[in-house]
Amino acid sequence: AGPALHVAHTEDGKKPEDFQKVYNAIAKKIREEDDYDDGVGYGPVVLRLSWHCSGTWDKKDNSGGSFGGTYHYPKEMNDPANAGLQNASRFLEPIHKEFPWLSYGDLYTLGGVTALQEMQGPKIPWRPGRVDLPEADTPDNGRLPDAENGADYVRNFFKRFGFNDQEVVALIGAHSVGETHMENSGYNGPWGAAENVFTNQFYVNLLNEKWTRITTEKGKTQYNSPDGFMMMPTDFALKEDSNYLKYVKKYAEDQDAFFEDFKNAYVKLLENGIEFPKDTPRIIFKTLDEQED
Ligand code: ZEM
């Protein structure tokens, strides 16, 4: 068999305003349930789900990826690399009930776009039309990255998607929000101070904090700073590799450049392997704040 063909098909009769309604429902729920994870809220974990449901993609045979929404099947949900993301899928399940016409792939990716924009990140032009695939299409475990690695591993890992160095550095800047949790990953702590505001602080902290390498109680290597921030080995690798470092410095100095490059790489991540009919509109959602003005 050749590579799987994943042709997007917008949910019947649905218009941009229907997807804005879904956006609003997710955004309101993020606002309301703001005590999750000691007051960080659901933004970071929902953003992470959008990455992990897309991060299984393999361009070699077009398997995995966001199209089929297969994260909701037990094999993928129970991938050890997905530990903790059940909080995000549990959070999104009532949205799926409220909008049963929406495919899982669209739900997870639209969730990430909503989380990012509501955390004051860049606007993400998003297209609908992912189609639920059967359980048999669930990718095997082991396709998501292992943070106990250096620059060569990171570069090679993201080759599977066709991402270059600049795109890789931009994408990992998502670690400006949220934190690592001992019970999920064996790492502990946040990368920065404003855990639910999307900024370029990941790069600023990577360059400017004083880092000490430690081993966590679960045997993982991490770098800690006196200000209470952390970096995983794959984060730290961006500073140790000269070509990655170039972009780290650029994004630390220029948040607009980071937002622009992050937006483009993230759109690619969410759309990898999908063929969208030419007339599928890209939707730019209004934030809740903008609708209240
Ligand atoms: Zn992450 N990430 N990530 N990441 N990530 C964690 C948390 C978050 C890697 C990784 O191993 C981990 C990208 C790339 C990579 C987010 C977004 C994005 C955690 C901690 C780990 C271990 C999970 C825990 O303990 O709960 C690795 C190795 C990566 C590439 C080399 C990309 C790309 C992302 C988005 C575009 C986010 C938002 C979090 C925080 C989640 C939370 O619950 O706070």
Image: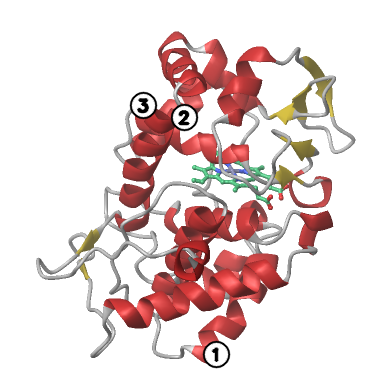
Q: How crowded is mark 3: few (under 14 residues within 10 Å), some or many (20 or more)?
A: some
Q: Disc 2 residue type?
A: Gln
Residue pictured at 52% horizontal, 68% vertical? 71
Q: Mark 1 points at which residue?
A: 97
Q: Give me the disc on residue 166.
A: 3
Q: Residues within 10 Å of mark 1 (few under 14, many from 20)?
A: few
Q: Is residue 281 above or below residue 140?
A: below
Secondary structure type for disc 1: helix
- Nearer the observer: mark 2 or 1; the answer is 2
Q: In this view, does 50 lie above or below 7?
A: above
Pointers 3 and 2 in contact (C-beta within 8 Å): no
Q: Which residue lies furthest to the front in this view?
A: 293
Lower sequence index among marks 3 and 1: 1
Give the quadrant of the N terminus.
bottom left
Lower sequence index among marks 2 and 1: 1
Q: Residue furthest left?
A: 278
Residue pictured at 48% horizontal, 18% vertical? 253
